[in-house]
Image: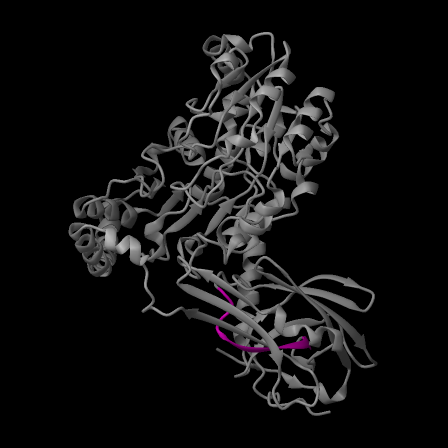
Amino acid sequence: MTKTSMKNLLSEHRVDAVISQIVWERIIIHFTIKVRVTTGANLPLQFYMVSANGFANAELKVNEIRDDEYHVSINVTNPGYCRCLQSGTYTIVICHNDEALCIPTVSLELAKKLSSLSHMFLHSGQTMGYSVDFGFVEGDEDLHLQIRAQDMERDRNEVRWNPLDKEQLSRKEKLRKVLHKWLLIPKRRLIQTYYRFRIHIEKLKHGKQTVLFMSEQNETLKGNVRSVYERMKQRNLDQKYRILVSTRNMLGKGGYGILNWLHFVSKVASADILFVDDHCPFMDWLVLDKKTKVIQLWHAGAGYKSVGYSRWGHAGSPKAVCAHRQYDYGITPSHNIAFFFSEQFGINEEQILPTGMPRMDLYLDEDHKQSVIKELHEKYPQVVDKEVILFAPTYRGNNRKTAHYPYQMIDFDELYDACGDEYIVLFKMHPWVSEAVPIPNQYKDRFIDAGRYPDINDLYYITDLLITDYSSSVFEFSLMKKPMLFFAFDEFQYEYSRGFHREYRPACPGRVCNTFQELLEAIRTKDFEFEKNEPYLAYHFDHFDSHASDRVIEWFVEGQLPAETEQALKKIQEKNQRLLQLDFSGLNWRGIKK
């Protein structure tokens, strides 16, 4: 590879720069840099994170130029090559093409609080961490910023079990835990070896391209993967492609034996195109063949909860290298919100394509809508000729095991009175919440627990007012062009514990209520702030049709990617290739002399 030696023009002072602000936004560092350009300097300017050995491991993104201030940023979990910023010590270097023009200093105001801006992201059950520390170039005459990124593991000898819990374990359970620990790694190595062997066998056996639809969260296909699978069948594409299905509930209580794994690995090895619907745990440690194209058809449209790398450092956050890193593409309903998904999966925004949500194809079909309304009126005759309130919040807790909803926050007496003869309330809790809604018997004429109803989207057809909180249900319901209320009694606690991936209140297409009394008042006065819905729709949807599944098939299976997408992906490759070629080793890292 031909190296480009950067010209050392630091002493010419064509550019002088001062970093005045550093702000964290989840996993993104924002820098405000005041730049003074003198005679002889060329534009545009590039900002590189250069390691101590003289390599540019990342280019900062220029978000805005306001007068003489540059607002630049870097996502430490993905600077552009779908991996964390490599461990190392970095200095920001301002350049123009192959000219190194300036290493910015830090303002005195920022210098006083620089150490407090360092951040540690714990992950992998809080047993590993990734740290970013800020300091100054040692022995330097000026305050030049030094950034140290470190991927590290915490003490592996720490006690993993609570001693009290350990004493209560039976001898059989202790033995099972020990065997699980010592047999897990050999089992994975066996599966990896078998996978590499099966790749060659499977490619020889089948002449057709193989498309595999997979779920490791459910025992049947659901949501987007099911919609695309069924659409391929409807279009008779099973004549052209070999279509396979693999479904397992890896979160369930039951385990899977070696025979199941061998059969499963054979399917994965044969796949040319792999569609997944959620996190697949096996992809955390099994590296797939580079020729296998992996597409994440994640179910959620655009909620508020931080997931994946958006909530890095919180309980349940992913490893630095996990299944998400193997996705070639993801999907989004709108190009405006592609960055939500790219941040969550740790891949580039250009890899998230605005196909729309395949599971919504049927949802938007008018004949289907009328058929479902008829069925729902038969199932819930109380709702006929009534205004229907759907109470559908998300769960509280870290995962499926701890998922719950604090029902004490609902004043059933007051809500019943507020309904009067006008409203019927359907309660549809998150599927992970196992506890039934404690509806008092005397209120069952106006309150219905619809928790067992399989598809919440169907309930939207008969809903006149949705009450939710941080759920992505707002996304689908907005298409009904009906009002919403947001009962966010724990808004601030949720923001700082679970985390949002965008500002909550400005993104809500309806009124936000922090108390149940506010919620009741909004219902009684019909103060829903419904005017927010139209801008929400315009921002979150590129398509208002029933052809998302067709776009997924045409773009990913048949290879007909939009020209602008291919060009954007090519630019990313070229940019990453250029980073590898830049050589800053000629600069003085021990101290920048004037």
Which is nearer the eye, 491 or 594?
491
Q: Position of residue 423 (x, y in %)?
A: 61, 14
In the figure, is residue 503 to the left or right of 223? right
Q: Is residue 474 visible?
A: yes
Q: Which residues are magenta?
A: 84-96
The quadrant of the image that shows the C terminus is bottom right
Q: Position of residue 217 (x, y in %)?
A: 36, 40
For residue 539, above or below residue 194: above
For residue 378, above or below residue 577: above
Q: Position of residue 293 (x, y in %)?
A: 40, 50
For residue 232, above or below residue 183: above
Q: Is residue 213 visible?
A: no
Q: Position of residue 13 (x, y in %)?
A: 77, 85
In the figure, is residue 434 to the left or right of 354? left
Q: What kind of secondary structure does the magenta stretch mostly adopt?
A: strand
Residue 562 falls inside the magenta stretch: no
Residue at point 61% right, 37% down? 489
Q: Quadrant of residue 584?
A: bottom right
Which is nearer the eye, 448 or 210?
448
Which is nearer the eye, 310 or 324?
310
Q: How many marks?
A: 0
Display coloring: one colour
Q: Quadrant of residue 90?
A: bottom right
Which is nearer the eye, 81 or 518?
518
In the figure, is residue 272 to the left or right of 481? left
For residue 328, above or below residue 32: above
